[in-house]
Image (cartoon, helix red, strand yellow):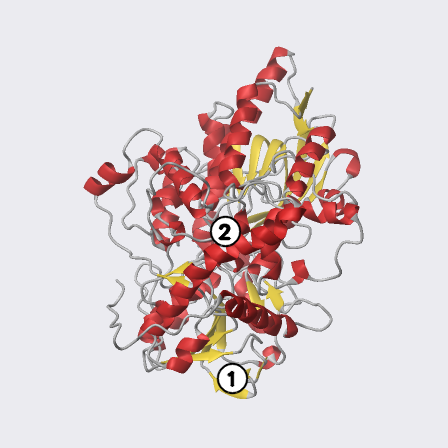
Amino acid sequence: MEQAIDPLLFPSPAALTAEEILKRYSEERSKRFSARPPDGSARDIILPLPSSSPSPSLPPQLRRLQDDPWVDHDLLNARQQPPHPPPALADGQHVDFLIVGAGHAGLLFASSLIDAGAATPERIRLVDAAGGFGGAWYWNRYPGLMCDMESSVYMPLLEETGYVPVHRYAYGEELRAHAERVARAWRLADKALFRSVVRRMVWDEREKEWEVEVTEYRGPVLGHREIAVRARFVMMSGGILSRPRMPKAPGFEDFKPHCFHTARWDYNYTGGSPEDPRLEKLMEKRVGVIGTGATGVQLIPELARWAKELYVFQRTPASVDTRNQRLTTAEAWQAMVATSPGWQAKRMNNFAAHVTKTPTAEKNLVKDGWTKPSAFGVQVGSDAWGTITPDKVDKHVATVHALDLARMQRLRRRVDEVVRDTETAEKLKPWYPSWCKRPAFHDDYLFTFNRPNVHLVDTDGQGVERFTEDAVVVAGVEYPVDVLVFATGYRFPRHGNASPAHIADVEVIGVGGRGMDEKWDAEEGVATLHGYVTNGFPNLFFPGPAQAGLGPNTTHMLTLMARHVAFVVARAKRAADARGWRRFSVESTRDAELDWSVKVAAGAPFFAPAVGCTPGIVNDDGRKDDGPPPRNRKEALRKARGNVWPRGILSFGEILKKWREGGSLDGLEVSG
C-alpha cells in the first residue's frame, strides 16, 4: 500500500501557468526528437518470433532470447506420441476454423464461435508460437507483473467462468492460469498446436478455403517440422505485444554482462521463480534496467529489494498515479461487482465511458486512476467532444489540454511529495500530456527512488549513448553493471503498414494472387468493414486495430470483435445453407469498406492533439509524425484511413449492434 506523505516535509511547488507547461512539453519533445538517428533509421532491435529460425542479424548475446524459456519440449513432444491423442494439427489436415494466436484474442474468438453455435471445439484449432495459452501473459513472468487495470473489466469471460479474482489488480501468474481456465471451460485445451508459427496463407477460390503453411519447432533435438493444412476460416489474432524490442546503441556487440528482456525473464540468473520471485542471486550484483514505461514501473521496485545496486536508465519519465491494490472478497464481489446478469459487459462499458469522458448518467463503478478526469480519450477515440471538423481543431486542442493539465500537474506534485532528493524528483516528472504514453499506476514505484541502493540515470531524453565491454554509457559517464535488463516493451502496435498480415508476420495471399500487404500499401491505403474484414480476403477475420473501436482495455475491444465475427459466421452459414452451398465464402464489398474507411478518415481531426507527443510507442518513436505534410487531399485521406474509430469504443459497439439488428449482412457478400 502507498506510504503516508507528510505535507510539511514536501510542500507543493509554485503553480506554473498553462502557457509555461505547454512550452515545457514542446521543449521536452524537441530534445527527444533531436536524439533520433539523423537518417531516420530505427534505434531499436526487434526480436523475431520464438519458433522462427535463428536470426543471424541479432547480436550474439541476444540470440538466446529468441528461445522460449518456459516451454518443456520433452513433455510436449511426448504428448504427441501414443497412447496420447495425435497432435492438434497434422500435415494435410483440413479444419473448419484456424485461429492464429492462443492469447486472449484467440480464446475469445474460439469461445465466441462455440457460444454462437457456429462451431464445436472439435472444429477449431489454434496455433501459437508459445508453449501454452496466455499470449502476453505466457511470455511475461517478470517480478512484479500485474494487470494495470481492474481485474473485473480486464480478465475475459469472468461472468461465464464464475471466477473471482484474488486481487483487484490480478498478478501475472493468475492471469496466465485464467487463460488456461478458459481453454478448459470451452474444451480447447487439446485443440492448440504450440511452438508453431503460421508462415504463409494462400486463398483457394475453387475450394473456398485457405492453404496454410505452419512451422512447428519441437526443440533443439527434433528441430523444425513443416506442416501444410487447409482451413475454411482463419482468425488472425496474434497479439500486438509479441515482438520484444531492445535499444540499439554503438558497442553492444562487445557488451559482456548478462542481459535479457523482461518478456524472457531469466530466473536461472536472478534466482526465484514466477510463483516465488525471490531474486536472491542479485544480492551482490550491480543491476541495470533500461526502460521506465508500464513494465519498468512494475519491475523496478522488485529489483530494488534484491539488487546490491540498481541503476535505472531513463529516457522519458512515466506518469505514475496510485493503484491502491487490495484483496478481493467473495462477499464484496457479489455485492458490488457481479450484481446481475450481464454485469461484466456493463462494467466494461461503464469503465470505457468514464475513461474517455463519454457522456453517461451512470455512476463510476470502477473508481480507479483510469477513470479520474483526464483527456486520455484523445489516444483511443471518444464521443466526449463531439465531431471535430478541421475548423474546430484549435479549440479541440485547447479544450483537451485544459482538462488534462490539472491531472498532470497533480502527478508532478506527487513526485515532489514522495521523492526526497529534489534533483531526482525533478528528473522523474513527466512533461507531456496524459495521452502521449500509457498511464502507469503503482503504490511503490516513486518511493523506490528513496532507497540508497537505487540510482536514477536520466539521459535527458537522449537514451543510452553507447556500451563498453562492461558498462552502459550515458552522457560520457560509464556505469558498470553485472546484468542488464531491458524493460523496453514491444514493437509499435501499428508498425509499418499495420496490416493484420504485417502484425502477425504472415504472408497472406488473397483473391487473384494479391497480397494483403500489397493492398495495405496501395494508393488508397487501409480498407476494411468495421476493422475486422477486408475485400479480396474471404473467410479471413481479424480484431483491428486499424479502423476498429479502441480503448485502454483491450479485452473490451476483443470481446466486441470476437462476438461480432461469430455472429457474422453463423448468419453467413445460415444464408449458405438456405442456398444449398456446401462451401461458401464471406467478405466485405468494396463499396462498404470504402464507405467505412471514409467515415474513419473524416474523424482524423479528433486526434490532432496527439501530433505533438514526445517520441514513444504512441507514434512509433516519432516516425508517425515525421516527414512533410500530405501534398494533397488524397495523401491526407490515405494516412487518415489508418486511424482507429474516432468516436471511441462505445460508439463503435453501438454501430456493430445496430448492424447485427439489421439482419441483412449489409456490406458483406456471401458466395458459394
Q: Position of residue 280 (x, y in %)?
A: 31, 73
Q: Position of residue 489 (x, y in %)?
A: 51, 62
Q: Residue furthest bottom?
A: 477
Q: In the rendered image of this protein, does residue 661 appear above or below residue 58? A: above
Q: Examine the image and state in which quarter residue 57 appears.
A: bottom right
Q: Position of residue 272 (x, y in %)?
A: 33, 66
Q: Residue at x 73, y 29 (%)?
A: 591
Q: In the rendered image of this protein, does residue 438 appear above or below residue 253? A: above
Q: Examine the image and state in which quarter residue 334 appears.
A: top left
Question: Would you call the spot at circle 1 few (<14 residues within 10 Å), some (14-19), or many (20 or more)?
Answer: many
| Residue 316 is at least partly visible in this image | yes
Q: Residue at x 28, y 36 (%)?
A: 338
Q: Position of residue 499 (x, y in %)?
A: 66, 46
Instruction: Identify the element where label 1 is drawn.
Output: strand
Task: Look at label 2 and name its amino acid.
Answer: Ala
> Is 230 on the left or on the right of 272, as rendered?
right
Task: Look at label 1 and name its amino acid.
Answer: Ala
| Residue 87 is at least partly visible in this image | no
Which residue is denoted by mark 2 in the rendering?
A: 130
Mark seen at residue 471:
1
**Structural distance between the alpha carbons of marks 1 and 2:** 33 Å
Mark seen at residue 276:
none
* Whether label 1 touches label 2, CB < 8 Å: no
Q: Residue at x 47, y 50 (%)?
A: 131
Which part of the image, by quadrant, shows the N terminus?
bottom left
